[in-house]
Image (cartoon, rainbow, N blue to C red):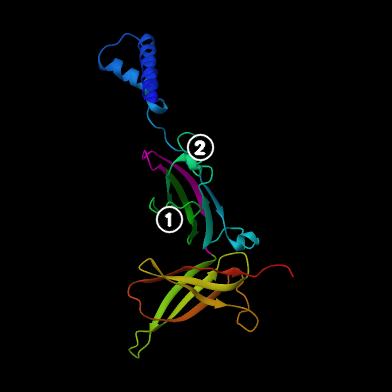
């Protein structure tokens, strides 16, 4: 009972002060302005503030062997630094629940249902991508979105041609020949491609590891090589793109 009387007393003070300070108005306008004075938080809820970072998370880059950021290449994303509507870190227990949604700009997304905090993503093709993070206040539904541009260099290999030679034994198998050209400025040790069917990823790491005893021992810049593989069980248009190639490390 003591709390109730105190609250009523405070409300009466606010009402008297509010009426004294407000300009002369009538009807609903007067009621709205008084309610504005006594509403929690001073009015409508604000929006959170999204903060994102995206950094390369790739061993070849760390070793200095992929200075052009050639794909496939991994990126690490983070929403550290994001704030709620009151300027409190969304990771603070007092900040309330906040959902996170990611759009990597290449057609791949991770929605609010996942609410990833520090996701990783692999970019498999050359291009300039606009990645985004959206933070949503789970209580109010208010959102904020931030974007970052990510530039991925050309693949290690140019696909010169792709052909298949069906076997005549009725097995459904075929010999695949993919002619590739090293379009980097480094000697390559691992020469591989990804295969796609109707533009959709099908198989990875189709290729060869070169070295002593192989011909050639390495794939020099601008040199071509024919990757040969026996494949089966595909239906549709078969294409290829540069895969996880590895250059020869320099130094001793």
The residue closer to the viewer here, 67 or 184, is 67
Which residue is depicted at the point 57% across and 55% down?
56
- The disc label shown at residue 88, or none: 2
In the rendered image, residue 53, in percent from the top left (x then y), is placed at: 53, 47
Residue at 54% over, 76% down: 225
Q: Earlier in the sequence, mark 2 or mark 1?
A: 2
Q: CA distance from mark 2 to mark 1?
A: 32 Å
Circle 1 sits on which residue?
106
Q: Which residues are magenta?
A: 136-155
Residue 233: x and y, percent? 35, 79
Q: Which image quadrant is residue 219 in?
A: bottom right
For the point 39% across and 14% down, the residue is 13
Mark 2 vs 1: CB contact within 8 A: no
Residue farthest to the right? Answer: 252
Q: For the point 42% across and 28% down, which residue is it?
A: 41
Please indicate whether residue 195 sits to the left or right of residue 188 in the image.
left
């Amino acid at each position: 009972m003591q709390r109730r009387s105190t609250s009523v007393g405070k409300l009466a003070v606010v009402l008297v002060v509010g009426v004294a300070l407000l300009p002369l108005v009538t009807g609903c306008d007067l009621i709205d302005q008084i309610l504005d004075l006594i509403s929690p938080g001073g009015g409508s809820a604000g929006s959170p503030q999204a903060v994102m970072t995206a950094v390369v998370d790739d061993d070849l880059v760390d070793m200095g062997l992929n200075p052009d950021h050639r794909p496939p290449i991994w990126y690490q994303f983070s929403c550290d630094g994001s704030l709620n509507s009151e300027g409190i870190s969304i990771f603070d227990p007092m900040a309330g629940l906040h959902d996170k949604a990611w759009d990597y700009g290449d057609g791949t997304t991770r929605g609010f249902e996942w609410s990833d905090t520090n996701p990783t993503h692999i970019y498999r093709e050359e291009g300039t991508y606009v990645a985004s993070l959206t933070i949503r206040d789970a209580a109010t539904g208010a959102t904020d979105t931030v974007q970052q541009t990510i530039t991925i260099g050309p693949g290690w290999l140019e696909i010169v041609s792709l052909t298949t030679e069906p076997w005549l034994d009725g097995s459904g198998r075929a010999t695949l020949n993919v002619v590739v050209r090293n379009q980097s400025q480094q000697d390559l040790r691992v020469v591989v491609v990804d295969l796609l069917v109707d533009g959709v990823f099908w198989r990875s790491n189709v290729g060869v590891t070169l070295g002593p005893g192989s011909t050639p021992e390495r794939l020099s810049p601008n040199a071509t090589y024919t990757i040969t593989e026996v494949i089966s069980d595909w239906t549709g248009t078969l294409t290829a793109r540069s895969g996880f190639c590895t250059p020869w490390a320099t130094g001793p």
